[in-house]
Amino acid sequence: MQTIQPRIGSLQLDNPTILAPMAGITSLPYRRVMKSFGAALVFTEMISANGLIRDGHKTLELLASCDEETPLGIQLFGDEPQVLAKGVQMVAGAGALLDINMGCPVKKVIRSGAGSALLKEPQRISRILAAVRAVYQGPLTIKIRSGWDAESLNFIEIGRIAESEGVDAITLHPRTRSQAFSGRADWRQISALKAELKIPVFGSGDIFSAEDGLRMLQQTGCDGLMIGRGGYGNPWLIRDILTQLEGGKISAPTVAEKAEAAINHLQLHREQFGDRKTIFEMRKHLCWYARGLPGAGQYRAGLQQVATIEQLLETTRTFFNEAETLSD
């Protein structure tokens, strides 16, 4: 396939791979790792507009960034047009793009009226986007699901509203809120939305291999791919998608490559957050890097007993060294 370089408003991307905003996952260290493997655009974790206004200093910690991850997308969530507009004004200069979350299925977010709860109120979505556009002229996107449930699929209606209110691109995860992450993402809905809109449409959902990524591009005609769960412990997913797009051959990462990426991620996290936070927050990432390797179960159990950063490093290096020996 030819090189794909989507344009989102005034922002030109180098390639069609985007890292999804994910709460508890896409902190600066994770974004730096994924950017180093080729992601054209990375996003902050989802940030509460209400939180920004009430306790801006604490929430602004989520905006910590560095030059190597540019361009950076910032995702906000909320349910009140003027609150979101004020939040946008507070963070507008911190990134190259703003996204409003209208697809998160998490109960805590839904109870607040935000995330995918907004799909039940198309006119509220219209008011939110109008309020945000009134104060922000840069690249603006939204991320949605296909509807609240199977009886209320309204992604095309929401897409039309977004386009009419001046949104520059839209990402569709073609599952309903009721599905959460169960079942299969219906990529036909991405095709339908792409056929209906003039603005770029990005596809998300069930991209776990380079073959999945290319298949989504070919089957749906979408302008790019948003990588979420498929990238957990697997930054090679982005590299491999780009390699295949260029006609190259891909190969599975070696144990040594997995070890290098895992320890680099750990060290970046330590540099950003310090020892204590790294011990707790890196456990899930290290478990993902270890998937499929011999001794992974024992390693996962051992991580829960680690009390110091030195133990964490030693346990991780020992695991990967032994896994490499067993894999030879």
Image (tube, rainbow, N blue to C red):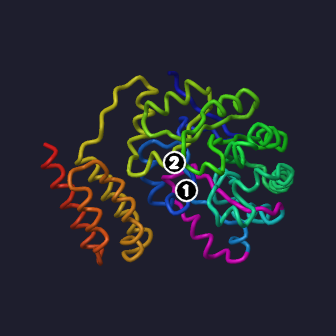
Graded by Cα atoms within 10 Å as few (under 14), some (14 to 19) or many (20 or more), the crowding at tag 2 reads: some
Look at the image and say whether residue 300 sits in the magenta stretch.
Answer: no
Q: Residues within 10 Å of mark 1 (few under 14, many from 20)?
A: some
Q: Quadrant of the C terminus?
A: top left
Give yes or no for contact between labels 2 and 1 (Cβ–Cβ under 8 Å): yes
Element assignment for label 1 = loop
Q: Earlier in the sequence, mark 2 or mark 1?
A: 1
How far across and how far down the image is residue 110, in percent? 69, 61
Image position, residue 9 (x, y; %): 71, 40
In magenta, the rendered stretch is 54-81
Q: Residue at x 50, y 21 (%)?
A: 1
User: Disc 2 designates what residue?
Assistant: 228
As shown in the figure, which amino acid type bears the numbered disc 1?
Met
Please report the residue visible at 55 percent of the width from the left and 65 percent of the height from the top.
Answer: 64
Instruction: State how far apart marks 2 and 1 are (Cα).
Output: 7 Å
> Which of 219 and 177 lies nearest the eye of the viewer?
177
Towards the viewer: 112 or 177: 177
Which residue does the image show at 64% across and 60% down from the upper left? 94
As drawn, the label of residue 43 is: none
Query: Within the magenta stretch, is there residue 67?
Result: yes
Label 1: which residue? 22
In front: 309, or 288? 288
Q: Secondary structure at mark 2?
A: loop
The part of the image, by quadrant, that contains residue 117 is: bottom right
Q: Given the image, on which type of amino acid does mark 2 rest? A: Gly
Image location of residue 41, percent across then percent down: 56, 46
296 in relation to 7, above or below? below
Question: Looking at the picture, how far across and down is residue 214, in whole percent?
Answer: 49, 28
